[in-house]
Amino acid sequence: MPMGERRPLLFWAGCALLAGFVLAAALAPLLSPYDPTLSTGRPLLSPTVEHPLGTNDIGQDMLSRLLYGARTSLVVAAVVALISTALSWLVGLTAGFFRLAEGPLMALVDLLLALPGIPLYLLIVTLIGPSRLNLILTLALLSWPAFARVVRSIVIQTRSAPYVEAARALGPTGAYIVRRHVLPATLGVLPTKVTLTVRFAVFSEATLAFLGLADSGSVSWGTMLSEAFNDPLLFSRPVWPWLVLPPTLAITALILAATWLSSGIESLPGTARRFPDSTAIQQTPSSERRNRVLLPRPAKRQWRR
Amino acid sequence: MSSDLLRLVARYTLLVIAVVLLNFFLPRLLPGDPLSFSSGEGMDLAAPLSDQAKEQLRSYYRLDRSMGHQLLSYLADLGRGDLGWSISRPAPVAALLLDRLPWTLGLLLVSLLISATLGTALGVAAGWSMRGFRDRLLVSLTSMLAAIPEFLVAIGLLLFFAVGLGWFPLLGGQSPFSAYDGATGWGRRGLDIGWHLSLPAATLVLAGVAGFLLIARDATVGVHREPWIVVARAKGLREREIALRHVLPNVALPLLTFFALRLGAVLGGALVVERVFNVPGLGLLAYQAIRARDYPVLQALFLLSSLGVLAASFGVELVYLRLDRRRGLVAHG
């Protein structure tokens, strides 16, 4: 990719932006002038001193809702990223190193990757109810396959590397080799996975909330937009920019922050350089590629009694 | 080669079976009974279902029978194209879906074709001037656009072109209360629909073009210093001819794969974009079904879209196999 020199700048911009959101979310109770779930003013007010971003159709303060919305987005993003990343690595390492598990696990990965995401989330979240926990679980349990495949491909390349061969000769358990020697080789793609999943989670939470799937009690940017668009006369009201623009800009800014962060990480040396979709999985650090060429491959299954 | 075909067919048969089974088991195995869910149990509804009505529904959906019986009758219904009745509307789900399908499918295909063509052209152009100004500009601009969710792009376009400039209609798939008759009725109706769908389609193109551009760019960068390109240039071919005849065929295969991969994502985007513009397609149906807690509609939507995506990627893999075989023949002389 070009722009190698520019990346660090964007990376820091992403960091700063994200830090701003985290701060806003953490300090939401202090910063927001009103309770975001209560009606505290006349409906559909344009910005005033009391309501700096105006009020919505039932008189809730938009600034408070925007601040508390950051909480929803960040909590969903953080938990989904954590669970999804852990699952990716668990499945990828298992499938790459223990061949008995490889068939069934990869079949599951293939199936999940073949399904269209949004219709599946719509069905599941509608069935189990759109509470925040259910939303998080759905997004987390369905977003691990792509990187499970990436991790597995790295493991497959690593397991025949000379240092793993050498370790194996000492006779430790498979789990020890994975933890001590294979896992570190896969950590290069970890930051990419985390930032991409954060982006995915913010994106999906907002999209589902916009389609009407959100906790009725919680405040989220997607819900704010969904409420605005429920009004068929939205654009004939003078207040519409204040209903539409703040949540739109907030979602865009948070997603851009994650994108910049990930593009900054990708440009650092020694990490995966590309968006790892299935067409670009084969990429490995050049040192590993060299090893593979120089050293004879071990006979299949030789190491396993 | 036929063994490849066999393996392909076997894999997709398994995937289709898995999707159908998933569609059957999801509502039954997930926590929460679909019936208690759609009857509003545990919520303060003014008129909860009576026990008798629940019993009737339970027996109508065969929830009182054994799982095996349910599965068999579900498969039989599916074979007849019967997807059950909608909970919120007095119509069979299959009819509702078929009614809305043309809107979504049209939107999907048009925007995919445009973004594939545009993305390829721009991608080859970008790859040709690798690391040049044009390359940097195109890559960073489109990646930025791809990072924004479709419905935000849609809102942006709506605000600018429909609310601000007033060039396009605010919402709907066609002008309301207009009758089209006479010899030119069809044409005028088509134009009206096209005018209404321009912004939704443009949204999907903007959101989808980046992937095609990046793939085409990388493939172009991969080949544009290859010896046969040098030979073509030495023959005196013009740059455009080199790009069309010698670069494009090499870009085609990865693009084809990506086309199939994108389909599911673009479908999701189309569903959301329809809500922004009130296009009466599957997305708006899904939105109304969510509000009415009409889960048979969502279930059918999931089945239809997964089978559609599977069918499309199967088609792409067939083409791939064919192209690959031809390449193999050439290579072996």
Image (cartoon, coloured by chain):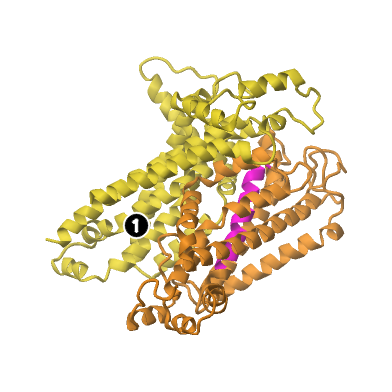
Q: Colour of chain A?
A: orange
Give the residue number, with chain letter if any, for mark 1: B254
- Considering the whole magenta stretch, tell me its main secondary structure: helix
Q: Residue at x 39, y 44 (%)?
A: B12
**Is B49 placed left or right of B296 in the picture?**
right
> Neighbour class for label 1 at 10 Å: few (<14), some, many (≥20)?
some
Question: What residue occupies the far top of the structure in this picture?
Answer: B182
Q: Residue at x 58, y 70 (%)?
A: A191
Say what amino acid the circle numbered 1 marks. Answer: Pro
Foreground: A301 or B120?
Answer: A301
Q: Residue at x 70, y 51 (%)?
A: A246
Question: What residue occupies the far front of the structure in this picture?
Answer: A305
Q: Colour of chain B?
A: yellow
> Residue A225 appears at what percent x and percent y?
68, 44
Q: Quadrant of residue A70?
A: bottom right
Work out whether residue A232 can be spotted: no
Pointer 1 chain: B
Q: Is residue B121 above or below residue A186?
A: above
Q: Is residue B17 above or below residue A90?
A: above
Task: Please check the rendered image and state whether residue B44 is part of the magenta-colored stretch, yes or no.
Answer: no
* Start-end of magenta stretch: A192-213
In the rendered image, the quadrant that contains the C terminus of chain B is bottom left
